[in-house]
């Protein structure tokens, strides 16, 4: 039996850092640039900002459900790489790109037709509805490109390359800001200019990935035409991952419904807390992305002991990083609200909620890592079913907070106890129980 040595641990650490550090940069680049994009639109007026905000909510929901294109492509490519079958890896990546193109075109057509009814369904009216529809329709070409970016990113991660996605993300979103500024204020295209600029930048990013995949495929004599059996296999895995993502979004949406009943102050504070939670999740997800790539590769190579060693290391790192982010957030909690609002009531509600969030960070670090490990193993069916179980477990806690309706800041505190501790505990238990078995460690490429 192989005993893990200090040299092995150093090698594991180097491999994890090599993938996780660039992945972190790519993950945080997008939300930072989107903030700048919002600022550009925000100076046009309240109606424009509200319309774009509503439209981006619809877009982010659609794009969020399609993130499986990266999560299903990464392990498929990584397994083949680990098995020494680079041609098979590139074929899997090619099929992922074709699936992204087909889904993207279908969604774009539906989105263009349904833009106005969707805006109305979201409650928009008057100028706000007009701007929302305008932004949605001009964003549809970019939606196709964004799904191609997901698949291309998954291919490169599977090939153990997270540096290129960092460069592409940084350059792409930098170009996005410049284009949006020019089109909105230089050519006076209003919110349409913002959507057009974003679509152009997204297509530039997508073309980089498509060219890279095509060149590698030709270099290794892999046909560019899709293997429809491979596309169907990607669709099967992707449907389970979509269900997993849907369960996560359902939990977040249900939480918003409950906090809305607590009043405007708690809703505003909750939105700020959720923004911070999402940003910290990006940071913790960097290790999870390394887990997807490394676990897939080592399982493909038939190295279960290394998979176990890597998993132990990354779980420790996830927990440790969670301790660091938790301590920083706990110390900053009384002052964070000042950056977003001058309302003292929102500050009073936000601070204790952030302390609860801070306490949950070590657990969140472990949960995100284990999620990445099982995604890397291709254990999509279990992740989807576990996601449903987690929501069922979370629902009674939400119902209790809704029915009791604690006064003031206490209501938000109990809501965050239910979400960041209760719901995350459920995720940790279901993921941890699975990770303790060997049933998810299917060796070889398949």
Image (cartoon, rainbow, N blue to C red):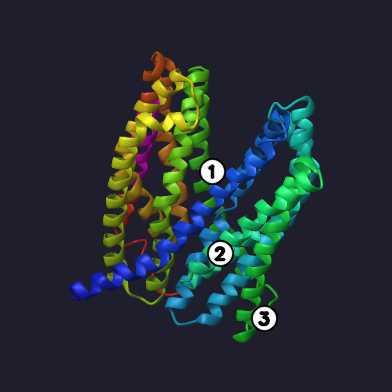
Residue 423 on the magenta span: yes
The part of the chain drawn in magenta is 414-428
Label 2 near label 3: C-beta < 8 Å?
Answer: no
Q: How many marks?
A: 3
For residue 211, side relative to residue 188 (left or right): left
- The structure residue drawn at horizontal position 22% and vertical position 75%, both measured from the top left corner, is 7
Q: Main secondary structure of the magenta part?
A: helix
Q: Which mark is residue 360?
A: none
Look at the image and tell me whether residue 179 can be seen.
yes
Where residue 319 sits in the image (x, y, percent)? Answer: 28, 50
Q: From what the image shows, is residue 250 above or below residue 65?
A: above
Ranked by sequence position, the earlier of labels 3 and 2 is 2
Q: Is residue 215 above or below residue 162?
A: below
Quarter of the image holding residue 203? Answer: bottom right
Query: Counting other residues with Cα less than 10 Å from the Cα at mark 1, is it few (<14), some (14-19), or many (20 or more)?
Result: some
What residue is drawn where x is 73% and y is 47%?
195
Name the residue that disc number 1 marks. Answer: 246
| Upstream in sequence: badge 1 or badge 2 | 2
Circle 2 SS class? helix
Instruction: Kindly state the secondary structure of the residue where label 3 is placed.
Output: loop
Q: Marks 1 and 2: CB-CB under 8 Å?
A: no
Q: Residue at x 78, y 40 (%)?
A: 190
Which tag, 3 or 1, sits closer to the chain's start? 3
Q: Mark 3 = which residue?
A: 223
Residue matched to label 2: 153
Vertical side of 224 occupied by 205: above or below: above
Residue 334 drawn in magenta? no
Observer-side mark, 1 or 2, equals 2
Q: Secondary structure at mark 1?
A: helix
State yes or no: discs 3 and 1 in contact (Cβ < 8 Å): no
Q: CA distance from mark 1 to mark 2?
A: 21 Å
């Amino acid at each position: 039996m192989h005993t893990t040595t200090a040299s092995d641990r150093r090698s594991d650490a180097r491999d994890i850092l090599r993938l996780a550090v660039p992945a972190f940069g790519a993950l945080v680049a997008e939300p930072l640039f989107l903030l700048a994009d919002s600022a550009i639109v925000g100076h046009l007026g309240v109606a424009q900002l509200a319309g774009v905000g509503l439209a981006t909510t619809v877009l982010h929901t659609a794009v969020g459900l399609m993130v499986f294109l990266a999560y299903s492509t990464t392990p498929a490519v990584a397994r083949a790489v680990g098995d020494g079958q680079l041609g098979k890896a590139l074929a899997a990546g090619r099929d992922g790109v074709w699936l992204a193109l087909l889904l993207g075109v279908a969604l774009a057509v539906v989105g263009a037709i349904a833009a106005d009814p969707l805006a109305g369904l979201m409650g928009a009216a008057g100028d706000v509805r007009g701007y929302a529809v305008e932004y949605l329709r001009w964003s549809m070409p970019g939606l196709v490109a964004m799904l191609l970016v997901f698949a291309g990113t998954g291919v490169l991660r599977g090939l153990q390359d997270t540096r290129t996605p960092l460069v592409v993300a940084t350059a792409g979103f930098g170009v996005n800001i410049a284009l949006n500024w020019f089109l909105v204020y230089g050519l006076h295209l209003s919110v349409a200019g913002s959507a057009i600029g974003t679509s152009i930048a997204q297509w530039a990013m997508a073309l980089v990935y498509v060219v890279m995949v095509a060149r590698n495929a030709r270099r290794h004599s892999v046909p560019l035409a899709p293997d429809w059996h491979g596309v169907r296999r990607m669709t099967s895995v992707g449907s389970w991952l979509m269900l997993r993502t849907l369960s996560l979004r359902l939990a977040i949406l249900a939480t918003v419904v409950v906090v809305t009943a607590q009043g405007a102050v708690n809703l505003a504070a909750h939105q700020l807390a959720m923004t911070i939670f999402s940003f910290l999740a990006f940071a913790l997800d960097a290790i999870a992305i390394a887990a997807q790539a490394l676990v897939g590769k080592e399982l493909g190579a038939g190295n279960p002991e290394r998979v176990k060693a890597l998993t132990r290391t990354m779980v420790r790192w996830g927990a440790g990083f969670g301790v660091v982010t938790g301590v920083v957030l706990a110390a900053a909690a009384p002052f964070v609200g000042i950056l977003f609002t001058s309302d003292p009531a929102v500050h009073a509600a936000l601070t204790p909620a952030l302390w609860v969030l801070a306490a949950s960070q070590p657990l969140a670090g472990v949960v995100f890592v284990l999620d990445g490990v099982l995604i890397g193993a291709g254990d999509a069916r279990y992740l989807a079913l576990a996601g449903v179980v987690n929501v069922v477990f979370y629902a009674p806690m939400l119902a209790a907070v809704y029915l009791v309706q604690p006064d003031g800041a206490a209501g938000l505190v109990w809501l965050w106890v239910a979400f960041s501790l209760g719901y995350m505990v459920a995720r940790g238990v279901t993921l941890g129980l699975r990770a303790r078995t060997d049933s998810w460690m299917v060796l070889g490429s398949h």
